[in-house]
Image (spheres, rainbow, N blue to C red):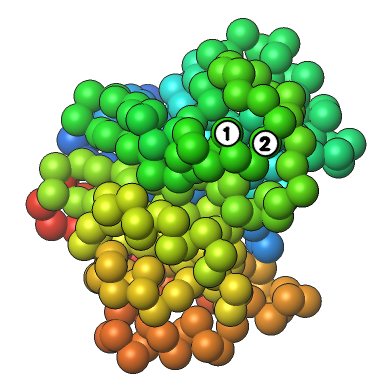
């Protein structure tokens, strides 16, 4: 047998073993929380048993690489997709997701964006059969023991800042406010483990969120707005007091994210910092009591 054939046989054997291991693997009882490396954007994938929640999709199709890496190849259904707000670096990859996966529930604000890409996504969502939920602080999603509780936007905020207040619609209402301020903020929980997911909120809206009284000590925080200096505040950090902070940003991005001021705030509080621009995907695994970083 020539070396070429030996090499090909080795490659085929490895592929078959990998496929068999995937096919016969049984989902564990743990939450796998993955900050996907999608470049300059956000995409957070939560996997619990056979259920998935995808929060944002990054700017383009890179999110599909993350889904293919962590989901079984035969699983083409995602239980919940959340769009924090309609900006390209958060919704762009969701176009590819809706073209490749069946989505059961789509959680997104009704506030509109005039970008062409968002119009494409709206058409895909509305034609997909997915249930559309416009969230407020009363929205709670349950997948077994996995909880996703919405903290922002509140119903009052929506009523005061958009034209109209229907439910189950996309892009029906317009606003003059910064779309970042409409970012869906939520706490994802399994047992005693809590992850604070923040979209692109900034200092202008953080006081309103803190006034709601729902921010508590958490183990994990997704730093808002890719670590921009117009995202995290000291008061917000002190209210949540996370053990680990995850920053999703593109390597050598033109915005200078994450900003040194943000990094200093975290370092001064001795909070562990994990960055997608430095290490790629960031995966945290928890059984609801202890948690660990998967290397």
Which residue is more in the foreground, 260 or 67?
260
Q: For residue 121, which quarter of the picture?
A: top right
Quarter of the image with the C terminus is: bottom left
Secondary structure of residue under mark 1: helix
Q: Quadrant of residue 146?
A: top left
Give me the residue at 69% from left, 81% from top: 256
Residue at 78% from the left image edge and 19% from the top image edge: 123
x and y percentages locating residue 239 in the rendered image: 28, 68
How crowded pointer 1 is (Cα within 10 Å; few <14, some 14-19, many 20+) is rated as few
Residue farthest toward the right in the current orientation of the protein = 116
Tell me which residue sits at (27%, 34%) in the image.
147
| Residue position for label 2 | 162
Q: Position of residue 169 (x, y in %)?
A: 65, 19
Label of residue 159 in the image: 1
Residue 284 pos. (x, y %):
32, 56
**Is residue 156 among the parts visible in the rendering?**
yes
Above or below, comparing residue 285 to residue 294 in the picture: above
Q: Is residue 2 visible?
A: no
Q: Gap in Å between the C-alphas at discs 2 and 1?
A: 6 Å
Q: Are marks 2 and 1 in contact (CB under 8 Å)?
A: yes
Residue 50, disc: none
Residue 268: image x %, image y %?
33, 91
Q: Secondary structure at mark 2?
A: loop
């Amino acid at each position: 047998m020539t070396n070429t054939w030996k090499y090909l046989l080795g490659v085929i054997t490895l592929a078959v073993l990998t496929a068999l291991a995937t096919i016969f693997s049984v989902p564990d009882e743990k939450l796998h929380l993955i900050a996907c490396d999608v470049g300059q954007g956000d995409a957070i994938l939560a996997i619990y048993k056979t259920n998935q929640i995808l929060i944002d999709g990054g700017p383009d199709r890179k999110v599909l690489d993350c889904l293919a890496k962590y989901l079984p190849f035969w699983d083409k259904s995602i239980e919940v997709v959340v769009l924090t707000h309609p900006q390209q670096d958060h919704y762009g990859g969701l176009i590819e997701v809706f073209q490749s996966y069946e989505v059961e529930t789509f959680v997104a604000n009704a506030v509109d964006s005039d970008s062409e890409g968002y119009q494409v996504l709206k058409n895909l969502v509305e034609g997909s059969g997915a249930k559309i939920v416009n969230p407020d602080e009363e929205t709670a999603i349950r997948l077994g023991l996995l909880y996703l509780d919405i903290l922002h936007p509140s119903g009052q905020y929506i009523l005061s800042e958009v034209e109209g207040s229907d439910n189950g619609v996309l892009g029906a209402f317009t606003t003059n406010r910064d779309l970042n301020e409409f970012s869906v903020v939520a706490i994802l929980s399994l047992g005693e483990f809590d992850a604070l997911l923040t979209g692109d909120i900034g200092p202008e809206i953080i006081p309103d969120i803190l006034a709601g009284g729902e921010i508590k000590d958490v183990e994990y925080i997704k730093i808002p707005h890719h670590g921009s200096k117009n995202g995290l505040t000291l008061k917000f950090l002190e209210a949540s007091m996370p053990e680990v902070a995850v920053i999703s940003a593109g390597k050598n991005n033109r915005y200078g994210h994450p900003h040194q001021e943000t990094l200093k705030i975290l370092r001064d509080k001795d909070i562990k910092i994990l960055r997608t621009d430095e290490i790629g995907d960031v995966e945290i695994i928890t059984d609801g009591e202890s948690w660990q970083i998967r290397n």
